[in-house]
Image: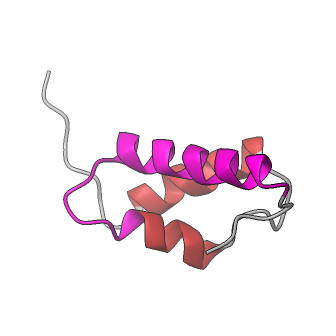
Amino acid sequence: MDFDPYNADAPFDILDARRAVALQRGVVDDSQLERIIAEPGESARFDVQALRSAVDIGIERGHTTVQS
């Protein structure tokens, strides 16, 4: 099965949806999501994992928000 490529907004929408379900408001801001998405040549799967890793690191360090 072939899938159509994502449109330009899809990666942000995917991460935004994950953020809305999994995190309290203010833990990760829009600019941080855009920074994750800006990594060249990566996939939406990588973006989701990068978000999760950023949150996990923040928790390990005792932060209440993800630090840039």
Magenta stretch: give its range.
37-62
Residue 7 location, x and y as percent? 29, 60
* Residue that lies at the very extreme toward the left in this rendered image: 2
Residue at the (62%, 74%) spot, across then down: 30
Residue 28 or residue 4, whichever sits in front: 28
* Position of residue 3 in the picture relative to residue 48 (left or right): left
* Position of residue 14 in the picture relative to residue 2 (left or right): right
* Position of residue 40 in the picture relative to residue 18 (left or right): left
Q: Is the stretch drawn in magenta largely helix, strand or loop?
A: helix
Residue 22 location, x and y as percent? 75, 42
Residue at the (45%, 64%) spot, across then down: 36
Relative to 42, is 46 above or below? above
Residue at the (78%, 62%) spot, across then down: 27
Residue 23 location, x and y as percent? 78, 49
* Position of residue 25 in the picture relative to residue 51 (left or right): right
Magenta span contains residue 57: yes
* Residue that lies at the very extreme toward the top in this rendered image: 1
Residue 48 location, x and y as percent? 49, 45
Relative to 3, is 29 above or below? below
- Number of marks drawn: 0
Residue 57 or residue 1, whichever sits in front: 57
Q: Quadrant of the C terminus?
A: bottom right
Q: Quadrant of residue 26?
A: bottom right
